[in-house]
Amino acid sequence: MSKMVYFDRVATALMAKEAVKAITEFLQVPVGNPSAHIHSAGITAAKYIDEARHKVADLVNAKDNEIYFTSGATESNNLAIKGYISGKNEGEIIISEIEHYSILDQVRTLSSLGFEIKFLKVDRFGMVNPDDLGKLITSKTVLVSVMMANPEIGTIQPVKELAKVCGHKGVVFHTDATSAVGYIPVDVTELGVNMMTISSQVLGGPMGTGALYIDKKTILKPIFDGGNQERGYRPGTENVAGIVGFGAACEMIKTRLANESVRLKELGNKLWQGLENKVEHIEFTGHPKLRLPGHVSFWHKFIEGESLLLHLNLKNVMAASGSSCSSNLKGIDEHDLRGSHVLTAVGVPEEYCTGSITFSLDYCNTVDEIIYVLDILPGIVERLEEMSPVYADYIKKREQNG
Amino acid sequence: MSKMVYFDRVATALMAKEAVKAITEFLQVPVGNPSAHIHSAGITAAKYIDEARHKVADLVNAKDNEIYFTSGATESNNLAIKGYISGKNEGEIIISEIEHYSILDQVRTLSSLGFEIKFLKVDRFGMVNPDDLGKLITSKTVLVSVMMANPEIGTIQPVKELAKVCGHKGVVFHTDATSAVGYIPVDVTELGVNMMTISSQVLGGPMGTGALYIDKKTILKPIFDGGNQERGYRPGTENVAGIVGFGAACEMIKTRLANESVRLKELGNKLWQGLENKVEHIEFTGHPKLRLPGHVSFWHKFIEGESLLLHLNLKNVMAASGSSCSSNLKGIDEHDLRGSHVLTAVGVPEEYCTGSITFSLDYCNTVDEIIYVLDILPGIVERLEEMSPVYADYIKKREQNG
Amino acid sequence: MGKEYPYSEKVMDHFMNPRNMGEIEDATVVADVGNPTCGDLMRLYLKIEGEVIVDAKFKTFGCGAAIASSSILTEMLKGRKIKDALKISNEAVAEALGGLPKVKRHCSIMAEEALKKALENWKEKEKS
Amino acid sequence: MGKEYPYSEKVMDHFMNPRNMGEIEDATVVADVGNPTCGDLMRLYLKIEGEVIVDAKFKTFGCGAAIASSSILTEMLKGRKIKDALKISNEAVAEALGGLPKVKRHCSIMAEEALKKALENWKEKEKS
Ligand SMILES: Cc1ncc(COP(=O)(O)O)c(C=O)c1O
Ligand SMILES: Cc1ncc(COP(=O)(O)O)c(C=O)c1O
């Protein structure tokens, strides 16, 4: 394929043309600082932000004034936890064991500051159990955070039930919906969450922008000191162009979501079945049904993930090893290479935990691309199996056993 | 004038066409997440960031790996102070009394956490004295932060001398160069600062991106927990489009800076002299010579600033009351309207501290615009004087005294 | 002309074309009120005949909202009976302007205070 | 074809076209080394005659850098005297590849370890 086949939406979707258009047009408008409330150039910038805010709110059925723009999901997650915990000195925090580093590393720090951290376990499909959450919560629990969908293994959590458990016990509930909003319908009111992280780039907006939904009952402190932007929750001049693109992508997704999630599901199923039929020795990860549409993840018993990805890339197919951190080639030392805690949590043996493959599809992807990938993959796998001492041992053993 | 006359660069310069072009072109390139180091789409994004980093570094004569991208000056200032203080429990911090809120509000918080805060005084021109700094530093001093140029009154501080004082005493020195980089030549190596905040939007790049220069001796902790981006100092997927525009603006400015600062200085002088000749009862603020080129700031004894700005805006001239916070019309209550601590510090009477005017010019501005503003301003002033009870009293008194 | 304004159309209109701006040479009462938060100062002139405010003028040093509040207040006062004028609240002033930004509510309060002060001054004067 | 690669040209070349991949049926020694950080496993086959490595092959389960390190190591070994082979360091392996990302240095270390282990095995064998 001469065209790039892009299967890495969970890391970043290719930008939606609607978002590109909105930003490109915005860049032609001479605007000032949105906090310059006195002059037209500033007010114009502020209006762009207000419009985008409305579009983001609309996608998740929030009120406009419950949406706070940030520089992305990492910041939203940090604002949710640090912002809520700020001023408290102790208490219990519960998170699932498969959270993103931007949640996981925070609670590690909090644990050293005197908070007790409890981990909500997942089953082999990566699914948490609301009953387990009910049992973990005590009178000391201050905050629960469980992601809506896992980017690496695709599993979608029962967020509504989790929020209900928290609601009953009067505990604030945050969900990191980075990999969910734009993929599946998300309605904050129906879900009953108190805070929710939203990412722009996963739904076709630009990278480096995002939002935190915060309901009116939940009070935070900002992470940054400074101006009054985002009603004081997020000081600093806004990334206006980014926000405009984020809004445009939300608007686009909203109209297409219903159809797209069906279409993506079909594509995903086709890919899954094709892999099952054509490639031996693979194990799928995540929940077989309750998963992101168009998301297929697996590991191969005898092949390391990166080398598979490199070969795919040589054939113009871009996919990911579940977490981009585990393929962090620019780290300072080996400590920056982290095996996936998500795979470990669902029971994948340690040595494969840098080796899983995630295909995550997008509204740009077509059935031809699925066919193409299913065409080239067996050859790549064969080549790497031939190179693998583990595979050689397996064959020898199989021959010995007749 | 039918064209907008934009005199509010210290809040945000109009975007340079080079930055608009770079972003527009970048948006046409299909890129992935720059942390997806395995596939071409990710690597391409990372290369864009590297190139921009080089351009930013080049503008301030830093090494590429001393530049850390952030979401803007507020975050850079927070990273510099919070990141450096993190893990310490006490000590003295020295800042000037005319810092931006993103510095000032931080030290207020730190003061409640057990740090001692000392304020470096400014003279009536808004200038600090390096000798005073030498006297303030003790063995307990951990950090000094003094801005390079004040956006409200234009005064440029003797940063090199301040850095030298800190260097001798072994104290880390940060400078908020938001309003300086791109306006005047800035060379971190020659200045000898340890950390420096750089903003994109003041030099013609997009809003919502910035950088912190950190020399190799100075070790910080990140504010956010999460991934390994920006060598671990700033987790979170990068605002790639914003960074690309920031880089392009730096590259443009670098070639034009020498000529532009001369040209802006001349325009600024023309405006200053024109005001002096044509408008009675005004007082200029800031240093008459050691100030940002093209920056003219003043207050009027009998007229409130906002109403002057509103009239200017009606005639298509966009200018600012020194700090955009003091014109925060979207605040939640009156506490969000803050009089300017900068004006107070240079001795402007309290009642005028929401009323100063800052004209800050840009490479887009022309001499015709200066002439236009000097043309319309006397009429506006007269109209407002006529409405002013304070002016009426003044006239009465003058008449009584003959 | 810029396209976007920080205030509602009504506020902008009163700011640009303030009604009853100026002094009343033979005013019955004059009242000064000021709000240090904002450096505002409002001077209200009333001419009262019998129980009726027959003329009202103002001079104001202040922001757009302060000028507009002053202007609309004088409009509301002209021809009004004292006892009705006493019922004019800051909310009524703000409402008449089509609303004010939250942070500018003190401007309408200043208008109410100027009115109250002027009428108190008048009562004092009547008594003596 | 994608345009940008995560590794140097040389690494990519050795990854795509690994030299001496496979088994030596009548190898003098075989050594397995692995690095749990990365789930890598390298198996090195050497055929030694007198003091000279006459053939070297490998099988590797691992990332691009691990495969490339294995490949270039076997190239460096073929026809080399044992005492010279012993001098091959991980730095030499990485250098021969035109450099490796810092986080992937353990791959060249793995190559060195495989070599050392194979030669130790050989010494043991010679002794016995
Ligand atoms: C579930 C989840 N949360 C948060 C993040 C952080 O997003 P960002 O890097 O855009 O800040 C990611 C990114 O991969 C993610 O997958
Ligand atoms: C001197 C100075 N520092 C920091 C900032 C904060 O910049 P930003 O709002 O882009 O984060 C400003 C903004 O006005 C400023 O003038």
Image (cartoon, coloured by chain):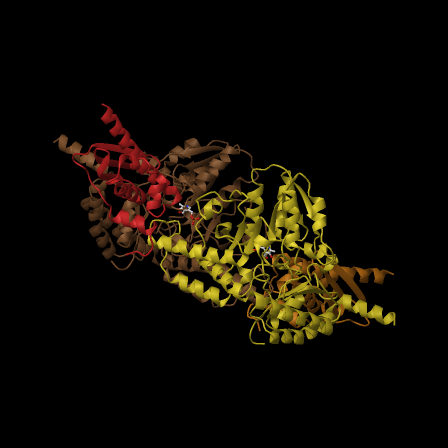
Chain colours: A brown, B yellow, C orange, D red
Horizontal arrangement in the rendering, residue B136 relative to residue B194 (left or right) = right
Residue A295 seen by the camera: no
Q: Which residue is most to the top?
A: D128
Give the residue at the far left of this rendering.
A402
Coordinates of residue B32 in the picture (x, y in percent): 37, 54
Q: Looking at the image, which residue is at 29% across and 48% down?
A: A309
User: Can you say whether A400 is above or below A356 in the image?
Assistant: above
Q: How many marks?
A: 0
- Place of residue B162 in the rendered image (x, y in percent of width and height, measured from the top left): 66, 50
Front residue of B217 and B395:
B217
- Whether residue A39 is visible, yes or no, is yes
Q: Taking C110 as reference, is D70 left or right? A: left
Image quadrant holding the C terminus of chain B, namely: bottom right
Quadrant field for ligand 2? bottom right
The answer to which image quadrant residue A162 occupies is top left
Residue A74 on image: x %, y %: 45, 47
Q: Nearer the viewer, residue C51 or A286?
A: A286
The picture quadrant where one finds residue A126 is top left
Nearest the eye: C41 or C120: C41
The image shows residue A87 at horizontal and vertical percentages of 57, 39
Quadrant of the rendering where the N terminus of chain B is positioned:
bottom right
Give the answer, above or below, for where C94 lies relative to A228: below
- Seen in the image, is A157 located left or right of residue A173? left
